[in-house]
Amino acid sequence: MAQNKPLGQLLQEAGFINEEQIQVALDAQKASPMYFGEILEDLDFVTSAEIAQAIAMQNNLQYIDLNKIIPSQEALKLIPFDIAKNKTILPISLDDGVLTVATADINDVVLLDYLQSISKTKIRYVVDDKKSIAKHIELFYYQLKNPIEAEVQQLVKDTLNNKEIDIAHLVDLFLNNAIKDRATDIHITPEHSASHVFYRIDGVLHHYYSLPKKLHKQMIARVKIVSSLNISDQRIPQDGSFSYTFLNEEFDLRVSTLPTNYGENIVMRLLGKTASLYNLLSLGITEQNSKKIEKYFLKPYGVVLVTGPTGSGKTTTLYSALRKINSLHKNVLTVEDPIEYKFTFIKQTQLNEKAGYTFDAAIRAFMRQDPDVILVGEIRDHTTAELAIRASITGHLVLSTLHTNDAISTIPRLADLDIPLYLIASGLLAVIAQRLVRKLCPSCKKEVIKSSSELKEMGMQDIVKEGKEYKIYEAAGCEHCYNTGYIGREAIIEILELDKELQSLITQGVSTFDLLNKARENGMKSMKEDGFLKILNGDTTFDEVNRVLD
Ligand SMILES: [Zn+2]
């Protein structure tokens, strides 16, 4: 079925790489013999996900991101683990006698026949990259063989029957479950009669387990021991960390304790060892907005800021946009805290405030390194802000993040940091403000029909047409999304672009309100409007957009 074009050509046609990158990769292949795809990935020209996307596109198959899908138990049971592992395929779902299977090798016809015969179903292939499939096979079959929930319930029963239980194992189960369900934080919270375990998934807390109160102190003690905290002191907050290995992947956990009136509360933050690289489109940024953002990242000088609260995905957006900069022709230097992804051709440095390597010290050092592009992890004080803007007006592109609620608030925020208005106006090119909304689970989202007047009442008057009916969706819940109705997140954004007129208004010191009006006159769309478009597109819900913006 596949016409086998060379991978380089395929990726070039898909718009992921250019001719020059192909030539550099061919050159690099002479220095270190690897598969062409591996070289391209190694040089950060493409991600493994993009290779899978290009292959899917060429063969008219669906690309699937296994980070955003949970296979059904029913599907997993149709293909034994050993076969899945040997052939690097992952069954995902069974619908009307058709088994959807993720593979990286679509041309293996023998395998296809084999899978049809052992599963006694028709097979529909979807494409992901080999590494991702291999990792997820381990994760999801582990869950099939070791039902964590059942094991926790057994330990609870044993405790109530006054049996001694293995506390270390219980804590491990919570960690395994957190990793499996892609939680970012684990909370162990006491109240007067019980202890509760909560997970934060896609930005929202979920209650997972209630446990007998007598286990609370033991669980806290266990976590404190592995994080090298003082067990005997339960009256002061403490911070620690430990690392944990699950299915050959290593995780760092940052631990903090807080004494409450019911006992110590513990929060563990799960940090993966390696971040993934994305492109703007795969973050859910529309094509139009992606083009706008890319345009600013290709400017020779000026400041581009990504703003939003903690956890709104600012770094991911910066990294995705950074990939558009040709680091073969431009000297790109970064100072980060921490370095979340290691690029091949970019000079990245780690902030070290104790040693005096601060954001502003880094900018000063970079200026002597013949830079084209400077990425400063965060602007949070006057000196960094001023140095960043001065660097931009002396001919460098400066990228950074800032904590503000929306794009326009960047102007008063920088003014609050004592940056003169004329300097803001002459340095700042554009501000991208963003939030993350949860994506509706495609397997269970529930269709609802709304009239234009109903949508107007919900604030969508600028988008809907009078007298029309609209199909939107609500969250439900199924086994593909652990009953939350959502799986994964994507960005909603607004882009403030500073033209001559806006620059002059900033210098004149006009109010934020007037600046916003002018920007809207120029066509700026708000994050809310971007969110509304995603609702009409069936990607997310009103509840989500309101949750992150109100
Ligand atoms: Zn679902």
Image (spheres, grey):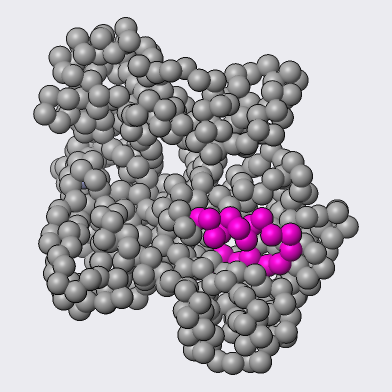
Which residue is more in the foreground, 31 or 497? 497
Asked whether, in this view, residue 106 is left or right of residue 352, the answer is left
User: Is 340 one of the magenta-colored residues?
Assistant: no
Provide the residue span drawn in magenta: 290-309
Can you say which quadrant of the picture contains the C terminus?
bottom left
**Residue 61, how many percent across, how many down?**
33, 29
Give the residue displayed 75% in from the left and 75% down from the top. 386
The answer to whether residue 151 of the structure is visible from this angle is yes
Please tell me which residue lies in front, 374 or 325.
325
Query: Looking at the picture, how far across and down is residue 231, in whole percent?
Result: 47, 55
Residue 482, visible in the rendered structure:
no
Q: Residue at x 26, y 77 (%)?
A: 461
Residue in view at x 20 percent, y 78 percent: 457
Left or right: 435 as drawn, with respect to 23: left
* Residue 437: quarter of image: bottom left
Left or right for 59, reference 11: left
Snapshot quadrant of residue 267: bottom left
Q: Which quarter of the image is occupied by the N terminus?
A: top left
